[in-house]
Image: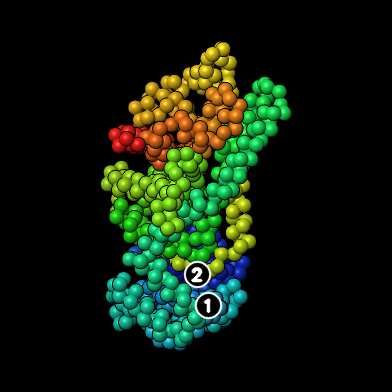
Amino acid sequence: MSGLRTAALVGNPNAGKSALFNALTGARQKIANYPGVTVERKAGRLTLPSGEPLELIDLPGSYSLDASSPDEEVTRKVVLGEFAGEVKPEVLVVVLDASNLEQHLVFAQEVIALGHPTVVALNMFDLAERDGLVLDPKALSEALGVPVVKTVAVRRRGLEELTQAIAVAERNAEYDPGDHPLSHLTLPERRLAARNIAKGAILSKSTEHMVHAGLDKVLLNPWLGPPLLFAVLFVVFQAVFAWANPIMDALDGGVGVLITLVTEHMAPGILRDFLTQGVLSGVGSVVVFLPQIVILFAFILVMEQSGYMARAAFLMDRLMSYVGLSGRSFIPLLSSFACAIPGIMATRSIADPKDRLTTILIAPLMTCSARLPVYAVIIGAFIPKTSVGWGIGLQGLVLFALYVAGIIGAVLVALVLRRSVTAGKASGFIMEMPRYQMPKLGDLLIGLWQRAWVFLRRAGTIIFTVTVVLWILLSFPKAEPGESQVDASIAGQLANGLAVVVKPIGFDREMALSLIPAMAAREVAVSSLATTYAISSDDEDAEAAQLSDQLAARWTMPMALAFLAWFVFAPQCLSTIAVARRETNGWKWPAFMLAYLFTLAYIFAGLTFWLATAAGL
């Protein structure tokens, strides 16, 4: 405590509070933690027009005084004077985003109704004008019953007027919350009032702003929004196959040509076998799926940059509330479609520990990009390139169904977890809707290059290393004349033991063998199958054959479907397990994750194989 009188900045996240705090206090700031919590305390010295100093506190962003996170709890206690060692602020400065007035007014009403001396900073006024909004601060002031000052913190506009208003409010403590028209309103009433107040304060809107508002009415509609989201995702997975096939065929053909060239121009021996059976057949079989990875991420990046991704999270909040989660879990789960590692790390934004733990445990069920090569090679080998309707390919439909199966599995597992080991009440979810905007081509290309480079780097490091190790284990010791090399190899002997376990669910030895290196990275299942079949083939032309052709000749349809079902539920790579251990501070929950995922994979692979066999597929 400094002994000075205090003022506090409050408001929703992303209202520009920190920028306003920095503009008002400059370098006269102190940063520490509130006692007993990890939430940061930022305080600075504000000089009033009279020359008198005032301590200004920048409180964490909040959506309500009914706290649902540690940040909101700190804000509530400071505002109400309940925090030990903190004095109750003499003045509350409510910071509003002028371009998102209706949403920010909900919390503003709750603060104003407390009856403390209050000033409203209508911040980022320039962005509102840029978006075509013409606002009337005087009308807003009359509706709220407190002074309203226009500010642009980053350009230091309106700071003198705001400081003067704080000084006047600090001297005027004759507030009676019982007489304030905003007192005792319920949350639905405050939301309705916020809409009406915003309408009264907005004098005019540009055509662009009205178009964006119209889009939100459609895309966020509880009845229209979900089917539209479903349709967008459906188109994405159709495009993954339809658009990528020509490029994939060209890459696959190129790998075959390289294998043929190496075979023709190198003398038979261990080095040639290493290049053809290990590197080209193994790693090459994974690299050919790069076009599908790029197309998938192109759609994801466009959804993010256009502002639609946040709206998808908002739409999913209702569905997720049925299983005890909130839309706050949607963003980490959506990130897990790229990779479960950043998805699990993104759960740090979830305040409720039970929500966070549940999200971590189900994140591996989201179909990450590493599974895409596995799905694609099996679908390409066993699902014909036929159309089931105008513009709807059967292969894309099956891929979409696999992604949906992962989502349904995650939802059902979350439902069980929230009623057992992670039981708890669903937390609320409020999020800021970003502005709609056209994705920038440069940013899109940079994002695609980064994702493609990550995939290629994995192919050149993890997948290459595991494939080489597998090739060595498959190549030694050398088989006797007339004996299969796979039977004689170290890897073959290891696979024989695992094959006994997975034989009831339709897996043969080669399939069982691919499951072991796949724990390093899901894509390695493809390269391990390619390497295994290349080594087991006596015909040099067979080494250059496409993996999908070899699978179609060796597997039955029930075996292929069981393999797909396994990878819908199979545990993630070891890196994901390590991150889960770090985020949960122990091995208890990662071990639980491994156990339930292996159990689900085995059960559903078996059910798929038995049902497909019974159906005569």
Who is closer to the viewer here, 254 or 580?
Answer: 254
Q: Tell me if label 1 and label 2 are in contact, CB under 8 Å.
A: yes
Q: Position of residue 312 (x, y in %)?
A: 42, 61
Q: Which residue sits at x=56%, y=78%?
A: 130
Question: Is 552 drawn above or below residue 480 in the view shown?
Answer: below
Q: Position of residue 468 (x, y in %)?
A: 60, 29
According to the image, label 1 marks what residue? 131
Q: Where does label 2 land, which residue?
A: 435
Type of residue at label 2?
A: Arg
Residue 198 sits above or below residue 551 on the image: below
Depth check: 532 or 132 in front? 532
Q: Residue furthest top?
A: 480
Say which mark, if any, is on residue 436.
none
Q: Pinpoint residue 227: horizontal percent, then vertical percent.
A: 36, 61
Give the colour scheme of this rendering.
rainbow
Name the element at disc 2: loop
What residue appears at the point 33 percent right and 77 percent down from the top-left corner? Answer: 192
Q: Is residue 88 above or below residue 172?
A: above
Q: Position of residue 474 (x, y in %)?
A: 55, 22
Name the image quarter holding residue 92. Answer: bottom left
Label 1, secondary structure: give it: loop
Q: Is residue 139 above or below residue 95?
A: below
Asked if residue 202 lies left or right of residue 543, the reply is left
**Residue 607 is at least partly visible in this image:** no
Q: Nearer the viewer, residue 436 or 293?
A: 293
Q: CA distance from mark 1 to mark 2?
A: 9 Å
Amino acid identity at mark 1: Asp
